[in-house]
Image (cartoon, rainbow, N blue to C red):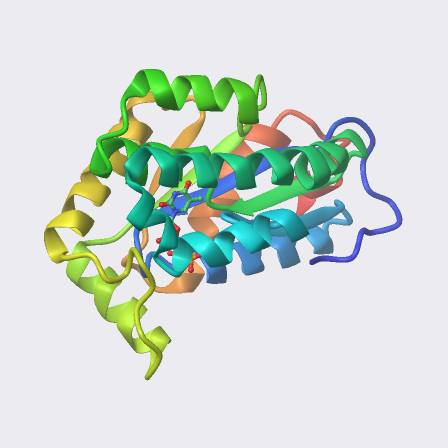
Amino acid sequence: MVEPAINGNLGRGRFITFEGGEGSGKSTQIKTLAERLKATKLRAIVTREPGGSPGAEIIRHLVLSGMGKLLGSEAETLLFAAARDDHVRTVIEPALNQGIWVLCDRFSDSTRAYQGSLGKVSPEILNAMERVTIGDLKPDLTIVLDVPVEIGINRATARRGASSPDRFEAEGIRFHQELREAYRKIAAAEPQRCVLIDATAEPGLVAEKIWTALRDRFFVGNPGNVASSA
Ligand code: TYD
């Protein structure tokens, strides 16, 4: 978590989510962006899903252990929804209301991609769950990191080392290919909110593209904002 800076700007914070398949580099990029925002004196926190609040972290443990899978796609989706509900109410909304920017590693697009496209949970059920868990809360910006499946899986395997894959890492290559397609479709369907970024490039270049996306949306034409000169 990035310490709030003393001179954070006033008003509601911005909600930025990071999405992508396994090994797309989200964690590295979120960390870099948080540091960069901190350097501009904007207050920011980094959080993640599933998890991000004490209650949701307990559910994270359950779903990543594979327990949720045994219950079937819809019940597993309900577990992600329950975790999100707690995370939104206890962490995300309070932070945004205090003017703190929230950088979240995965959010509702993960449910759309993993449970919707792959688990075949219907859009009606997903919409109903979103109404309950997130209501009107939409990310102000969603960064979708896109890498070919082989590269992503190799990165994730190298990162994992000797430990065994979690419930989703253990799925086959076809699952990950469909997942990539699902994310590309989400990004294409909502270009105002989503930016699809080629994450095969070296991390510094990817970070620059992410910063440009933020600058274009939040800082350009707003000279009073500290980040405009960064
Ligand atoms: P995590 O270890 O955080 O993976 P990653 O580094 O890839 O983000 O594990 C989270 C896993 O949970 C990931 O495989 C995606 C999956 N997931 C869903 O299936 N649905 C969801 O709504 C969310 C938030 C995550």
The residue drawn where x is 78% and y is 34% is: 99
Q: Quadrant of residue 3?
A: bottom right
| Rendered location of residue 166, percent (x, y) | 34, 63
In-image side of 203 versus 59 (left or right): left
Viewer can see residue 172:
yes
| Rendered location of residue 68, percent (x, y) | 37, 48
Of all residues shown, which one is farthest toward the bottom?
A: 162
In-image side of 123 versus 120 (left or right): right
In-image side of 136 versus 68 (left or right): right
For the residue pair 150 and 68, the one nearer the viewer reads as 68
The vertical placement of 106 against 62, above or below, is above
The residue drawn where x is 63% and y is 32% is: 219
Of all residues shown, which one is farthest toward the front?
A: 71
Of all residues shown, which one is farthest toward the right?
A: 6
Viewer can see residue 53:
no
The residue drawn where x is 46% and y is 44% is: 106
| Rendered location of residue 98, percent (x, y) | 81, 34
The vertical placement of 50 against 109, above or below, is below
For the residue pair 47 and 190, the one nearer the viewer reads as 47
